[in-house]
Amino acid sequence: MTISGEPIPQPLDNRRRRLIFRAQHRGTFENDILLGDFVKAEIATMPPQELDDLETILEYPDPELADWLTGRRPIPPHADTPMLRRIRSAALNRW
């Protein structure tokens, strides 16, 4: 269904809403912005595998995520995934 050619946004399922909340309420303002903005912008089109990858990323501690996302430290091999690189790229391109 469309309105004047534009698709009507569909409500997000519970899993996606929960991931947005988790990404926007990390405990540090820096990560709330860096992760939250990315997730809010991209979540609607993420397939289930990317949602799984995102859930894994949200388990990392805030200090490590902040360092990786801002480029202060390289992403270590155990955490280096396409999803985390996408989030970092979006974070670095904010400025």
Image: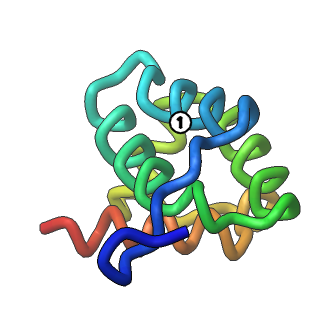
Q: Is residue 80 left or right of residue 65?
A: right
Along the line of sight, which residue is nearer the eye, 13 or 33?
13
Give the vertical position of 55 relative to 1 (above or below): above
Q: Residue at x 44, y 46 (%)?
A: 35
Residue at the bottom extreme, as displayed: 5
Q: Position of residue 61 (x, y in %)?
A: 60, 29
Which of 47/75 is in front? 47
| 75 versus 33 height, above or below | below
The image's colour scheme reads rainbow
Quarter of the view holding residue 36: top left
At a point 44% along the width and 21% down the height, the residue shown is 25
Q: Position of residue 23 (x, y in %)?
A: 51, 34
Residues 63 and 12: in front is 12
Residue 90 pos. (x, y %): 37, 69
73 and 46: which is toward the camera? 46
Image quarter of the C terminus: bottom left
- Circle 1 Cα neighbour tier, 10 Å, few/some/many (<14 / 14–19 / ≥20): many
Q: What's the residue type where badge 1 is placed?
A: Ile
Question: Residue 15 location in percent, x, y?
Answer: 75, 35
- 86 relative position to 35: left or right: right
Secondary element at tag 1:
helix
- Residue at 87 percent across and 63 percent down: it is 49
Q: Is residue 40 above or below residue 31?
A: below
Q: Residue at x 65, y 27 (%)?
A: 18
Considering the image in quadrants, where does the N terminus appear?
A: bottom right
Outermost residue on the left side: it is 95
Q: Quickly name the residue at label 1.
A: 20
